[in-house]
Amino acid sequence: MNKRIARLIQLGAAVATVFALAGCSTYTINNADPEAAEHPGGKTAEDAIESYFAALESGDAAALAELAVEEIDVDSIQMPDTPATLKTVYGAPEQNPRPVDRKFVTVQIVYRIDSETATWDASMRYAGEEKGWQFFDPFVSIAASEDGQLGLDAGATIMPSKHFAPGIHELGDELSTKYLKAPDRGINVRLAHAVDNEATKNGTRIQKAVDLAQFTLTDEAKAAAKSKIEEFRDDCKNWCSHFDRTIQPHEQLPDAEGRVLRFKSDAAMPDKVTLIDSHSKDEKAWYEEQHSHVDPLKSFVKIEPVTIERTKYTCKNNDCTYASAAPDYKVVKKAAFIYEIKGDELEFVEIRDNE
């Protein structure tokens, strides 16, 4: 009996020893000094910044995409014709973060675009030893300009589909629209990161560059203008009423009188299509009357010569008669129809008699 008791006492002591050892081991792991851990190797934040500007210099869009936190389609990246060059970096951590360290930093980067200096408060994230440091905002922001405009009507539509890297961009096809073609040489625009309302400044720079550039009408614009005259010819065979910025088929009322017009059936279709914009010296006074000072990028299409008939009508009890002789009837051989370019549409503005 005493042997049995002694055996149990020995077994209990062994179990206690095992638990004691396990407790010591756990205690040692939980109390390891996190500050004593080594910093991971690989490229530092400053290395990533230098790689960013090296990619700009070499025009390597794929390398730039690798440095972005967000997955970026390489084809959407618009590399500058004159890239920004690195000048100074402030606040970049010298070592990569340990598990206990913050993995997000804001680094102030000063760079040059040609002879001008720009500042970028870059938000960066450490993505591990393999990927290293990446940027949340590697591309410039482009917002509406200070007076609410952004390049052409279609200017805003190019921005979500393109990622512009900092530098001087020669914008050409990016600013062309369905009806307006940008100059063949392109338009040089300086685009920088969004610091101190720089996003708005980028939009303003684009607007000013577009305002100075001379656009031309596309073949589609000329065809669209001619099709508008064809619509007028077909819709107004039985005369049309002409009100402010509208041409509508004439509505015969019980008792009314007024003036109507139509395309002269035996006349040739017009073949001269002209762009009217801020560069049109001959149309300057008319252009300013169209409140172009509110929107300096307004553009219009003028198509001529259109031969039209104008006459006076008189309706009594829904029976309408139309004057066929002077002074109430007139043929205008050199009329011009003017339309405003609004995105992908042409909106009627006025008819100019030109006689």
Image (cartoon, helix red, strand yellow):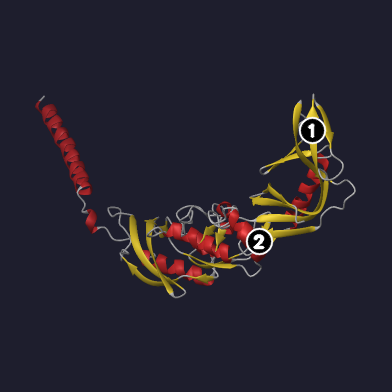
Q: Which residue is mark 2?
A: 283
**Residue under the image location 57 percent in, 66 percent down:** 212
| Residue 314: mark | 1
Check the image and name the residue furthest to the bottom: 115
Within 10 Å of disc 2 (Cα), the crowding (few <14, some 14-19, many 20+) is few
Left-right relation of 50 to 61: left
Residue at the extreme front of the image, as rendered: 327
Q: Nearer the viewer, residue 116 or 205?
A: 205
Foreground of the two, 168 or 18:
168
* Residue ID at (34%, 62%): 107
| Amino acid type shown at disc 2 | Glu
| Residue at far left of view | 2
Coordinates of residue 268 in the picture (x, y in percent): 87, 53
Instruction: Estimate the spatial distance between the alpha carbons at disc 2 and disc 1, rounded to whole Å.
Output: 36 Å
Q: How far across and how far down the image is residue 338, in percent?
A: 70, 52
**Label 1 neighbourhood size at 10 Å, few (<14), some (14-19), many (20+)?**
some
Up/down of 150 relative to 25, above or below: below
**Foreground of the two, 62 or 23:** 62
Q: Residue at x 66, y 43 (%)?
A: 244
Task: Please tell me whether mark 2 or mark 1 is closer to you in this view.
Answer: 1
**Which residue is outermost to the right?**
266
Compared with 260, 269 (above or below) is below
Mark 1, secondary structure of its residue: strand
Of pointers 2 and 1, the one earlier in the residue sequence:
2
Specify the amino acid type for callout 1.
Thr
Residue 57 at x, y percent in the picture: 50, 72
Q: Is residue 240 visible?
A: yes
